[in-house]
Image (cartoon, rainbow, N blue to C red):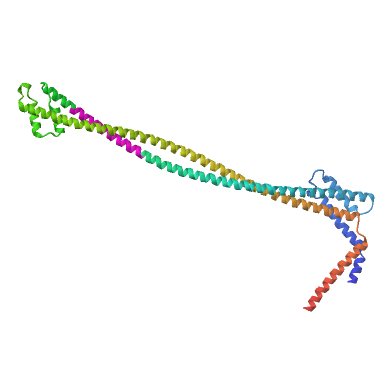
Amino acid sequence: WFKSAQCQKQRPDLQAGAMAAGDVQMICKALLDPELFVFADAASSDTRTMLAAAMPHACGDHSYQKEIQGLARNTLQSAQAAAKSEGVNFGEEALKAEALIQEAKEHAEAAAKTTQMASADAAAKAAALEEQKAKVLVAVTDDEQAAMSLQVATENHNSAAEQKASADAAIALVKSFEAGELLEDPTEVLEMLKTARAEKALLDAVVALLKLQPSERGEFDSIVLAELNEVLGTFAGSLQHTLDEAGLELKDLTSEALGCGALKEVEQEREETASKTLLAAEETVEARRAEEEAAKVAVTDREAGRSKHLMEQVLAQDRSARAEAAAAAVERLQNPPAPEAMEVDDTKKVVSEETGRSDVFMGMVGA
């Protein structure tokens, strides 16, 4: 250990020269590093190149050497200050980004809830539309059935009216015959008797009666004529009753058909309104989804911005550290440590190394 320490003590100048050469190399590397000088008012590339070229010759106390050292130190310290300031600024921007990210997340959550509400509303309107379609189907069916019933009722009414008119015509013919006018064609009267389901005996008697002049008619013929009038009158009365009932039914079914038609139109209009409402609700859902996606993108963008600020902060801190180390190297060139201090430091280093070796050796022996 003593011998090693003596060897170190015999070479302080060599050690100082090695340290100075290392510092100069660090300083030159920092001066030529363009990353350290991207701030406003930074020394130009030509100026820094000139300083780097002069640094190997600036290790001394000459005024020229001191001036070079001072210029290099000021240049590096300005780079350090700029990088440090940038690091602080990027850190502040990262903190601001945290608040913006939280705000964006809250907005995204609110947008998601709004989308859910819009989707639920659209689902409800879709269900309402399906329900309304079912009502339209029922209304259309009712309208068709009412129209069919009305058609049947109209046909029945027309048929009853025609039968009543035929009966009235037959009665009028009989009245004319009773007044003394012979019928050219008694078929209509006979057919009406058949329709009235008169007895065959009456039909046969009427056929004979309708051929007789008033002067040729006897008491029996008068009885047959009275029976004929009674049968036709009774039948005409029943036809009138049927016609009245058919008229009432036609009136009711006409009102019902009109009501069913109106209800169908109302239900169809409601279906159209429900369809338009659903379309608007679906468009709202799409708009809310777009807003939700935009909010999510905003969160991602702001998180990316924060990451960028943090990365830039780390890079700025690294530039500051490199510039600070290079400035410290210039400081050592301007104020080199005393040889005694170097010897003490080296002696401590040698003792530490020898002690370490002894501990390793003793450990090996003990093993």
**Magenta segment:** 141-167
Q: Is residue 70 above or below residue 9?
A: above
Residue at 18% of width from left, 27% of height from top?
168
| Image-based side of 111 in relation to 20, left or right | left
Location of residue 261 (image quadrant): top left
Between residues 112 and 324, which one lies in front from this camera angle?
112
Q: Residue 171: where, in percent of width, then height?
A: 16, 26
Q: Taking 43 as reference, is 301 left or right?
A: left
Question: Can you say which quadrant of the picture contains the C terminus?
Answer: bottom right
- Residue 108 in sight in this render: yes
Residue positioned 70% across, 49% down in the render: 308
- Residue lying at the far right of the rendered structure: 62
Q: In the image, 250: left or right of 55?
A: left
x, y percent for residue 149: 30, 36
Q: Is residue 100 a member of the stretch shown in magenta?
A: no
Give the image quarter of residue 346. bottom right
- Whether residue 191 is visible here, answered yes or no, is no
**Which residue is drawn at the image coordinates 46% and 39% (left, top)?**
274
Q: Position of residue 64 (x, y in %)?
A: 93, 49
* Magenta stretch prevailing secondary structure: helix
Question: Observer-nearest residue: 299 or 132?
Answer: 132
Residue 184 percent location from the top left of the image: 12, 23
Q: Quadrant of the N terminus?
A: bottom right
